[in-house]
């Protein structure tokens, strides 16, 4: 079966996503369990996870097309793991919570192969593991967990960057001619003030998760397209991309802030705030980052294609000049009856 990488990604993610939704309802609403980590929920993976997985599939496809084959044996193993996982959680709720660490070991021992097997229902694991571009799994996982890693380890970076981001926001506002919005840096927050709205920008809106997302995507794209540019040019492309994503995040924050002001005026303060923060603030970031990645790498390919075209034209013009000179001399000698 032949299909586009996007369609293959959707097919591979179909079972894991469906089970995630059902298991979440079962564990949280059904059993009343609260399983997770401080500062992290599965909401942080809604967009970066599919985007990172799509990057992985596209990298694999450049080396060898992934063949779609229904794996009945893996589905059977997956079903057993799923049943065992449900029973373990059911036993825990029924009074086996005193097992403590043993229950945690059993939970993780079942969860990891359960998730992995869900991805291999439509293709052979051997085809994926032996693909020459399987190394891209590392950068792809960094894309998936970019926000999680940044929120876990990025606090010192954010505290150092707050003052510099204050200057960056003021610069953008100055060039845009906006003198109403005022920006001031605090210890852990940036304060954006407008007569109708005041917000405090914290670590999660710093944009460093977007930079990590871009660098991870870059570490896949660059090796797969290494011949497009010179080594030094790739280095400058990386620096340019980091700067581009920094500016992109500044514009994202300011646009959401402006949208919140407009929503407050049209819908009222409470409804406007809920709409903007719930819909745009939570999920718009990675959609913008995805657009930024596509735009940036498409630009690199377009520039490289133009350079190759110009180079071919120069080579062709050189050959044409050589041929023209040769035949010009030949005609001159012939006219003079010279050999």
Image: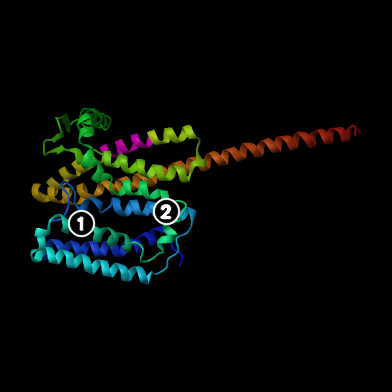
Screen quadrant of the N terminus: bottom left
Screen quadrant of the C terminus: top right
Q: Secondary structure at mark 2?
A: helix
Left or right side of 183 for 60: right
Q: Residue at x 25, y 45 (%)?
A: 147
Disc on res. 105: 1
Which is nearer the eye, 87 or 293? 87
Q: Residue at x 44, y 54 (%)?
A: 60
Which is nearer the eye, 101 or 70? 101
Residue carrying label 2? 58
Left or right side of 272 for 283: right
Instruction: Name which of mark 2 and mark 1 comes first in the sequence.
Output: 2
Residue 57: give x, y in percent of width and height.
40, 55
- Which one is in front in this view, the residue at disc 2 or the one at disc 1? 1
Q: Residues within 10 Å of mark 1 (few under 14, many from 20)?
A: few
Disc on res. 216: none
Provide the residue span drawn in magenta.
Answer: 240-250
Q: Residue at x 71, y 35 (%)?
A: 321
Left or right side of 274 for 247: right
């Amino acid at each position: 079966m032949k299909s586009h990488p996007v369609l293959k990604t959707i097919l591979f993610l179909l079972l894991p996503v469906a089970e995630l939704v059902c298991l979440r309802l079962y564990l949280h609403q059904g059993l009343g369990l609260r399983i997770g980590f401080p500062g992290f929920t599965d909401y942080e993976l809604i967009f970066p996870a599919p985007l990172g997985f799509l990057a992985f599939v596209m990298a694999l496809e450049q080396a060898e097309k992934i063949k779609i084959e229904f794996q009945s044996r893996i589905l059977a193993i997956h079903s057993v793991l799923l049943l065992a996982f449900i029973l373990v959680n059911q036993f825990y709720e029924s009074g086996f919570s005193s097992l403590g660490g043993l229950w945690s070991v059993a939970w993780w021992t079942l969860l990891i192969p359960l998730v992995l097997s869900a991805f291999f229902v439509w293709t052979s694991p051997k085809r994926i593991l032996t693909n020459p571009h399987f190394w891209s799994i590392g950068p792809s996982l960094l894309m998936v967990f970019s926000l999680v890693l940044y929120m876990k380890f990025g606090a010192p970076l954010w505290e150092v960057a707050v003052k510099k981001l204050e200057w960056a926001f003021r610069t953008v506002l100055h060039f845009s001619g906006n003198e109403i919005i005022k920006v001031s840096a605090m210890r852990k927050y940036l304060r954006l003030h407008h007569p109708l709205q005041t917000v405090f920008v914290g670590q999660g809106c710093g944009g460093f998760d977007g930079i990590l997302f871009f660098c991870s995507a870059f570490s896949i794209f660059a090796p797969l397209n290494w011949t497009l540019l010179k080594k030094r040019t790739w280095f400058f492309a990386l620096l340019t991309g980091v700067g581009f994503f920094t500016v992109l995040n500044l514009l994202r924050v300011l646009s959401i802030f402006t949208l919140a002001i407009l929503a407050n005026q049209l819908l009222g303060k409470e409804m406007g705030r809920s709409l903007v923060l719930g819909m745009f603030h939570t999920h718009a970031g990675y959609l913008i980052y995805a657009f930024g990645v596509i735009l940036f790498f498409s630009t690199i390919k377009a520039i490289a294609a133009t350079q190759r075209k110009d180079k071919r034209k120069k080579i062709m013009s050189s050959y044409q000049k050589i041929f023209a000179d040769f035949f010009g001399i030949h005609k001159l000698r012939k006219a003079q009856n010279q050999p």
